[in-house]
Image (tube, helix red, strand yellow):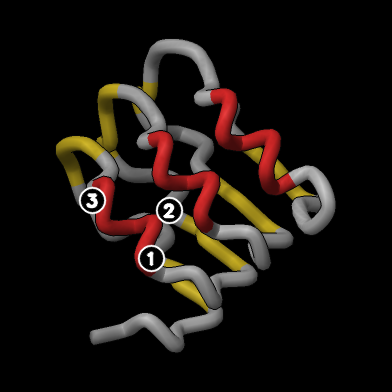
Amino acid sequence: LLTGLTELDVLQSNLEGTLPTQIGLLTKLSVLNMANHHFSGTLPIEIGHLTQLSSLLLGENSLSGTLPTQIGLLATSLVNLKMH
């Protein structure tokens, strides 16, 4: 599958639904940009598997709830977090 993917940028593609838990399988990602869609629900805990992630852009969605504690696993790599 796409397990070697390093950047996933699907800005403004009108996607909707919840973010899939399978996102955690993309462990080589350094950039995840899924801003300006219609995503809802909570951020999956599997986001913590993306330990090489330096940029997480999820703004302009309808995500709800609290950030999963697993996001703390990204503390050494994450330099850009946008969820407004």
Q: Amino acid at mark 3?
A: Asn
Residue named by callout 2: 34
**Picture coordinates of residue 81 (x, y %)?**
70, 42
| Marking on residue 22 | none
The relative height of residue 64 versus residue 22 in the rendered view (above or below) is above
Q: Report which residue position mark 3 lands on.
A: 14
Could you tell me which residue is drawn at 46 percent across and 34 percent down?
Answer: 60
Alpha carbon of mark 1 to alpha carbon of mark 3: how far? 9 Å
Measured as percent of width and height from the top left, residue 68 is found at: 51, 25
Mark 3–mark 2 Cα distance, whole angstroms, equals 10 Å
Quadrant showing the N terminus:
bottom left
Tell which circle, 3 or 2, labels the residue nearer the N-terminal end. 3
Of marks 1 and 3, the one in the foreground: 1
Q: Is residue 40 above or below residue 39?
A: above
Is 8 positioned to the left or the right of 31 in the image? left
Disc assigned to residue 10: 1
**Residue occupying image coordinates x 57% and y 48%:** 57
Please give left or right for residue 79 compared with residue 53 in the image.
Answer: right
